[in-house]
Every structure is written in structure tokens, then in C-alpha cells.
Image (cartoon, rainbow, N blue to C red):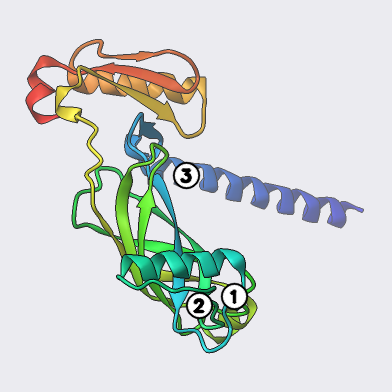
Amino acid sequence: QNRKSSLFDREYNMKKIILIFTLIATQVFATPTRIKDLVTIKGVRENPVIGYGLVIGLNGTGDGGTDITSQSLIRMFKTLGLDPQKEVSSANVASVIVTAKLPPFARIGQKVDVSISSIGDANSLAGGTLLVTPLKGGDGKIYAIAEGPLSIGGLNQGANFATGGRIPDGAIVEQDIGLNFEKRNALRLSLKNPDFTTNARISRTINRELGGKFALPKDATTIDLVIPEYYKRRL
């Protein structure tokens, strides 16, 4: 009985020592967290855009006689100066929805990736090419133009998800997304994970670095930050 008690005490003490060293190591080697990893700035975000387009060059795996695809082909031919007199259908064409996310401060000429998803009866988009497709924002304005050959991934992914694909750098930004940061007198910071303590610490750190009371915590999520005069020309 005494031997078992001794072994138990020894094991307990060993676990206690390991726990103490773990706590010490956590304090010694802990790295500071950057504020930029904890918050987002109001207005600085990705902007989704969407468009409707046609994928051509399919090997008989397209929509065939789907009404929306036929109407789209007729409109496309008319823009090219042709005037088809009857319904146009082809199993080598598919109707698709094209989506992309424009990064914050997107500028004209910048390229972004696009995703393509079939909306008709196509069996596969493999080998297809997306025709020129305008991408619009929520305000109805055209912000990017997409086109190019599709990629549906590797062999396994292509077999399982053949009606969806991507075009790396497949869209070119046609309109700047300006936020007029240089004209702002204040910023609003939002915590990614709302917490009163973290909010207070961030505000205290900012005020200490700027040398005044410029950061004001509003709630567990929000910090209002007034721009100091000496930072307004280099916001």
C-alpha cells in the first residue's frame, strides 16, 4: 500500500512540474498578436460581382436545346452581325453563372480569379472556354470582364464536379473601387471576435502609441478611431 502511495505521489508531482514548466514556457515564448489580425476596418472588404455567360467548345456535353441557352446564342449572333432565322441549339454550349470577388482597393487592369457554375443541363464543362462576360456589382454597374479557358481541377475533382470550374486571373477589373481614405477624419474598427477585454486592450494600445485619446471603444465589437492631424496626409 505504501509503495502504491509513493508511486502515486511521484506521478502527481511529475505532472505538477510539467504543468508549471508549460505555463512558464507559454509566458516566455508567447508572441504578441498584431491588431491587424484582430480587427477589420469598415469599408475595407471584398466585393462580390456576378454575371451570366456562355461556355463554348464542349465536346457534346453542353445544354443542347435549353431555351435560355438558345436565346443567348441568338442574342450573341446578333451582336456579331448575324441574324439567325430559327432557334439555335448546340450540345457544345452551356449557360453558366460567373462569380468573382474583387479585393479591397481594386484598380483598373488588376486581374482576379473567377468561378463558373453551369445552370443548364450540361454534363461537363471540361475543355470549354468562357466567352466575354461582364461582371456586375450590387449597384448594377460593370466592374470586371471575364473570359478564357476553364479548369475543372484534377482527375478526381473534375470527375466529381464537372459542372463547375475556375479561371485563374480570368477577369480584368474595369472600374476602380475607391474608398476615399485620404478624405476621412475617422475610421471604425470591428473586432473579428467580439470581446470587451480585447476591445479595451486594443484601444489602450492605440492611444498609447498615438499619444492621446483617439480610440474610443463603443461596445464589444466596435472601436471608433479619430485620425490625428499629423497622420491625415499619410493615412
Percent from the top left, x then y, of residue 98?
A: 45, 60
Numbered badge on residue 93:
2
Q: Quadrant of residue 4?
A: bottom right
Q: Residue furthest bottom?
A: 59
Query: Which element type, helix, strand or loop, lies under badge 1?
Result: loop
Tell me whether the residue at label 2 lies in contact with that at label 1, contact meaning CB atoms closer than 8 angstroms: yes
The dot on residue 63 is 1
Dot 1: few (<14), some (14–19), or many (≥20) neighbours within 10 Å? many
Q: Amino acid at mark 1?
A: Asp
Between disc 1 and disc 3, the foreground one is: 1
88 vs 138: above or below: below
Position of 227 compared to 131: left or right? Answer: left
Q: Residue at x 41, y 44 (%)?
A: 30
- Marks 3 and 2: which is nearer the front? 2
- Left or right? Give the position of 160 relative to 173: right
Task: Name the image quarter holding the C terminus.
Answer: top left
- For badge 3, the amino acid type reads Thr
Alpha carbons under labels 3 and 2: distance apart: 59 Å
Question: Residue 57: image x %, image y %?
Answer: 44, 84
Q: CA distance from mark 2 to mark 1?
A: 6 Å
190 lies above or below 185: below
**36 over 102 or under it: above or below:** above
Rendered image: mark on residue 50: none
What residue is shown with label 3? 26
Disc 2 is placed on an element classified as loop
Q: At x 60% / y 78%, what residue is drawn?
A: 64
**Residue at the spot 59% in from the left edge and 75% down from the top edge:** 63
Q: Are marks 3 and 2 in contact (CB under 8 Å)?
A: no
How far is the residue under mark 1 from the one under mark 3? 59 Å
